[in-house]
Image (cartoon, grey):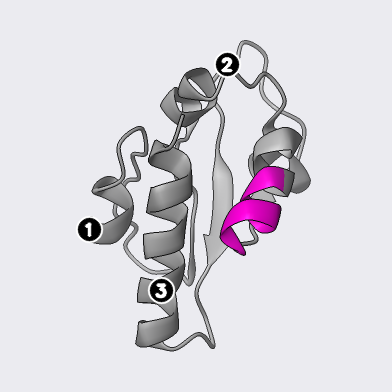
Amino acid sequence: MAGLNAIDGVSVASPHTTFYLFPNVTRVMGRKKLTDINQLMTTALEQANVSFCTRRHFGTPLAGEEDYYIRLAYSGISVPDIGEGLAALKEFFERD
């Protein structure tokens, strides 16, 4: 949680119990001048070697939904690997 919220442009609420998170990346999309969340997903994989799903993989957006969310799952991933992935994601997300 702290690692994601430390990334400029990312915010995520603390869940009570789960093994995945839905960070809001709307500000990252704006900084990168992207209008398609799939562009962010593909570019993150290519440039940061980090993969994630988008909120749209889990149902149709609600009427009036304008924010962009990604889904990160962390079950079965070691703490060092999570740290490495967060560092790569931070560098990619904060780069213009």
As drawn, the label of residue 32 is none
Residue 1, how many percent across, how many down? 29, 59
Instruction: Quickly name the residue at label 1.
Output: 2
As drawn, the label of residue 66 is 2
Number of numbered discs: 3
Upstream in the sequence, badge 2 or badge 1? 1
Q: Secondary structure at mark 2?
A: loop
Q: Main secondary structure of the magenta part?
A: helix
Q: Nearer the viewer, residue 34 or 62?
A: 34
Upstream in the sequence, badge 1 or badge 3? 1
Instruction: Quickly name the residue at label 3.
Output: 84
The CA span between labels 2 and 1 is 25 Å
* Amino acid type at mark 3: Glu
Residue 69, how many percent across, how many down? 55, 38
Q: Residue at x 33, y 53 (%)?
A: 4
Q: Secondary structure at mark 3?
A: helix
CA neighbours of label 1 inside 10 A, class few (<14), some (14 to 19), many (20+): few
Q: Nearer the viewer, residue 54 or 7?
A: 7
Q: Which residues are magenta?
A: 43-49
Upstream in the sequence, badge 3 or badge 2? 2
Residue furthest to the top in view is: 64
Give the label, 3 or 2, closer to the camera: 3
Q: Is residue 47 magenta?
A: yes
* Amino acid type at mark 2: Glu
Q: Find out whether the residues at labels 3 and 2 contact each other: C-beta distance under 8 Å.
A: no
Q: Residue at x 67, y 14 (%)?
A: 63
